[in-house]
Image (spheres, coloured by chain):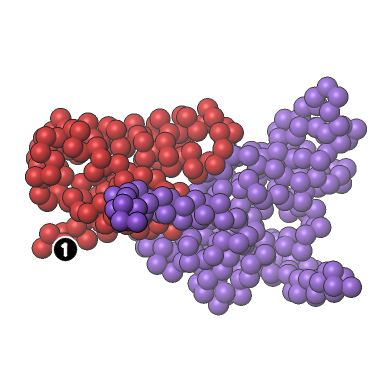
Chain colours: A purple, B red
Amino acid sequence: MKNLFLFIVKISNFLLFVVLEVVAFILICRSHPYQQSSWLSSASRIAASVNRTGTDIEDYFQLKEQNLLLSEQNAELLNRLAGLQQQPYRYLPGRVVDMTTHKRRNYLTVNIGEEDGVRAGMGVVSQDGVVGTVCAVSRHFALVVPVIHVDNHLSCRLAGNRYIGFSTWEGGNSDYVMLSDIGRHVSVQQGDTVVTSGLTEAFPEGLTVGVVDRVAVGDGENYQDIRLRLAVDYKKLEFVDVVVNPMKAEMDSLYLKHAVD
Amino acid sequence: MQWIRQIVKWFLLILLQVLIFNNLHLSGLCHPFIFILFLLEMPLLPRWAEMLVGAVTGLMMDIFCNSPGVHMAACTVVCYLRPLLLPRLVQNAERITGEVTPQSIGVNEYLRMVCILVPLYHVLVFVLEAWSLHHFGFLLAQTLLSALVSLLLLVGYALWRR
């Protein structure tokens, strides 16, 4: 018994090492975009405020460019206003304070949160097109899973012939995603526009996702390999809008009721 | 006084990493992690304490990088290995007091330690983050380039201080 005790004392450092590694691996395995707790991410208050300070400092060096961008965006927004008035959706303007594009699981943090009306599951768009989906919110910040995240699949539609597929991203270049589930009989041309399908309540129908960049059909394959060039350039992304769908609660309760029945 | 200096150094290196080095988007490949300078240089402590410091530092970095567990695992490995590595590089390693710096253990020994632990750290972080060897070429290029840039920065800093 005494020997056993001595042995444990002797390898106690190694045991602590193993325990710490196990904790770390549990954290790694558990991290799924839709279960991410907001305190262990850049949406947490401390991390977000540090990142925001960094962004504030950057701002001073980019004021001129920013002004130009804002005025362009203003014009664009005014143009869109007419169209928006017929839709039930509302848009909450926000700003990206932190983002990664090089990993397989990328996230971005925006500076609006629960107090501004943002909830998990809402869509996020920029003036160029679809950005991603909100996965966690804290009081003043929201964490967004972009289209360039291996676990994020966005329901899309070919604007021309209305066929429906979904986006897939497997890492690498943040400018391109694959469009899956388009059968080989569907005619797809390079340059075709791909838009949101409107089948999820997060996005209105017809928002630009990207443009078909390359089409290939393998021998004996039922589906085409379609590569899209994303409309949004994540590396330059700064201003985004969170999409609020006032009908979402009603739709959710309908699904829930159906599931219970 | 020593303690305050270490705490200040910890905060400064984390801020430097988060505000500057995490925002270097050089072709999506180059992501140097220089904050581990703190873990490489911290004064020798009981091994359990070093590992705990490593785990907490890594977790802090994970919060900023949205990668729960990745930096924690890698930092813990570095802190577990450093006390095993030092006696092999330096004679009388137990007599080192204060920080482990080029002055306190000798430039050659210091550079050797950095050249072992820094690339190891980058390999661990990028492999754990990708969690697969799917895009192996991209992963390899990312790891090599990032580790190289970190090494250049840390070795440059060490030589400059000498």
Question: Which of the two residues, A107 or A13, is positioned nearer the viewer here?
Answer: A13
Residue B14: image location, x then y, percent: 31, 54
**Quadrant where the image shows the N terminus of chain B:** bottom left
- Vertical placement of residue B82 versus A8, above or below: above
**Amino acid type of disc 1?**
Ile
* Residue under the point 46% across and 56% down: A23
Dividing the picture into quarters, in which one does residue B59 lie?
bottom left
List x then y, in percent, for residue A254.
84, 73
Location of mark 1 (residue) = B4
**At 18% from the left edge and 50% from the top edge, which residue is drawn?**
B44
User: Residue B48 location, x and y as percent?
Assistant: 28, 55
Which residue appears at 22% of the width and 61% of the height? B7
- Residue A126 in view (yes/no): no
Judge left or right: residue A173 versus residue A41. right
Q: Position of residue B91 (x, y in %)?
A: 11, 34
A196 or A41, nearer to the observer: A41
For this view, does B132 lie left or right of residue A61?
A: right
